[in-house]
Image (tube, rainbow, N blue to C red):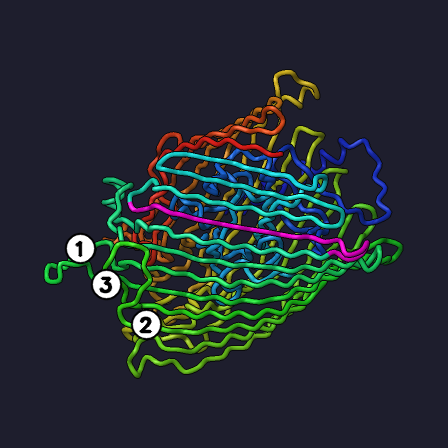
Amino acid sequence: MKKPTILIIVFSIAALAHAQQNDTTKTLTLNEVTIHEYKSLSEMERMPYMKENVIYAGKKTEVIQLDKINADLSTNNTRQVFAKVPGMSIWENDGSGIQAGVAARGLSPNRSWEFNVRQNGYDISSEVFGYPETYYTPPMEALVKIEVIRGASSLQYGPQFGGLLNYQIKKANPNKPISFETQQTVGSYGLFNTYNAIGGTHKKFSYYGFLHHRNAEGWRNNSRYNIYTGYFSANYQLSKKINLSGEYTNMNYKSQQPGGLTDIQFKDNHRQSFRERNWFGAPFNVASLTVKYDISQSVNLQIKSFATIAERNSVGFTKSITTKDSINPTTLQYNARQVDRDNYKNYGTEVRLSIKFKFFGKENIFAGGIRVYSGNTKRNQLGAGTTGNNFDLTLTNPQYGRSLEFGTTNYAAFAENIFQIGKRLKVVPGIRFDYIENQSGGYINTTQTGTLNPNKRVRQLLLYGIGSEFMVTEKTNMYGNYSLAYRPVTFSELTPSATTEIIDPNLKDASGFNVDFGYRGTVKNYLSFDVGVFYLHYDNRIGTLTQNGAPFKTNIGTSVSKGVESYIEIDVVKVFTEKSKIGSINFFASNSLIDAKYVKWNNPAISNDPAKSIENKRVENAPQYMHRLGASYYLKGFSATFQLSSIGDVFTDAANTETPNATGTIGKLSGYQIMDASLSYKFMEHYNFKAGVNNIADAKYATRRAGGYPGPGIMPGNGRTIFVSIGASF
């Protein structure tokens, strides 16, 4: 992004802040730190200054209220759910909604791995340090909120550059001993979705649980899926000061993977598929136990222990899309499929403490804690599977072609403090220390030379940052923060993918920092906004280059993402009147302009050849703009929303290759525009009706290319689909 553009935006923010300050008529008396939650017009909120012993003051935050949103929740439609979060790029692998792939500020959306992804505050990724991909996404119908915290969350949560993504599941009805909720949905291409929940509160005990199932044939050929999710939580108020709670989630699915396409195939018919024998499944079990202890009015302690026991399983024909998966004329059977299986066992505990105290006559807040984490991953790949068509993980040879085991131990300590300065300003310094130990071993092929020597890496990392927040008016504030961030080298990056590949012995963790500055809040009850700028410095990015005729994996360079993010929503009726018989009409605009480029190229062998350097090239998978515009109408129990998503083009490799290759794995992806519409009607107090049309104009588009499973090739987005839903709650 050009500097004059940034200066104009900053000037505009300052001018808006000045106008709001002059317009306010109320006198502010802030003798103590008060926990406020800034509510906007409808679906969006901001995080309070502190929640669950975590400080959010001075950070850029968004909270999506799922119970107020018009969207296709039955298929976890992320472009609709995250519509009002500016700068959120989305990968659409398929129309199942099983895995959410989102990212911010030009980072990779691959299974949301640049976010620290949590459910109710605990980890749900495969392995938070070694393999942070998220194969489990809770059904959106089960959620009450989604919390998104950008950059500076690295101090409290660590370690990803993207920040925190926290799914908050619904809780028990506090006023009834038993309550029931059900939602039944049918839609295009055989979609059937059922969500049923029960919960309640009796004296000191409360509970909530749900059962969810979804299946469909899928919009593309060879894309049927079947998913089951179950959840149960229990909460007991042991005393006035001590609260105990526990929860457990089980998710299991099998999903047929239609594979990628070449660009010619995509242009000819983007619904077609040439992989009918590829399947994917990921049984996931996650659980947590939480103790909350209000030691005094000023001191609060929370201990949260959690565990993940899960798998990642795939079977299929994974060769290039230009290689046909056909019957062998000699055996009159298909060739054996490849079987890959991961097993994850992760355990952790986080202890968080908050203390309110007086400092120079002002009440301040300290929030800190410690974390202990252990992760184990067993990875078996290149297994010889069956020649059949179904989801069958049976091996015809008991020995896998590659077998690896990885272990992670993490100890962390972190602390932040809100210093109240005067009546309006809060300053929040913070620090985090991480000890990370990774171990690996196994073999990458069955030959004698394929055995790997046990490898151990130990890192001790210190992060720090500072944020601030200035109350311009009672309901608006300016915020800013700076914080260091890092991304450990993952297991796949530490392990050769073939005997010819060489791993740089000095491979470094990615490191860098995030900067935010913005102005946000509400004006009366008709305008909500958050306008800001950001700067993300990402050093030691890891990639593969050719050196001495062999692939060499190393830190290839540094990227910088900078830009503008803005969210504005206005209720045009309430601008003129508080009471209206015609209902309410909201318009929203969620926009981001991103300049994400490589600023440094670390390859000394070809750095003198400008034609081969990636310096000044655009970062892959980073659109230069993302605009999501929409309008909603509300009248009593009826509401309807129309949304337009306009996303810029992206390069899919660091070299910014324009022309696609023959296999469809690299090449520029064109920008696209998608229109969606949905409505909801609540009637007779307990019942609701919902319906919608996704991709109204049946636009042809793609959000990503796959280099391996489930491709390889270009991955088409879904065409036009519809859904109809009926529900009730008692």
Instruction: Please check the rendered image and state whether residue 242 is part of the magenta-colored stretch, yes or no.
Output: yes
The residue shown at (76%, 33%) is: 22
Task: Name the residue tied to disc 2.
Answer: 400
Q: Which residue is situated farthest in the left direction here?
A: 330
Magenta stretch: helix, strand or loop mostly: strand
Q: Position of residue 722 (x, y in %)?
A: 41, 32
Placement of 11 over or under 104, stated as above or below: above
Circle 2: element type? loop
Q: Position of residue 168 (x, y in %)?
A: 60, 48
Mark 2 or mark 1, which has the lower sequence index? Answer: 1
Query: Label 2 vs label 1: CA separation?
Result: 24 Å
The amino acid at mark 3 is: Ala
Q: Position of residue 448 (x, y in %)?
A: 30, 83
The amino acid at mark 2 is: Tyr
- State the mark number for residue 336: 3
Task: Name the residue tied to disc 1.
Answer: 326
The amino acid at mark 1 is: Ser
Q: Which residue is situated farthest in the right direction here?
A: 361
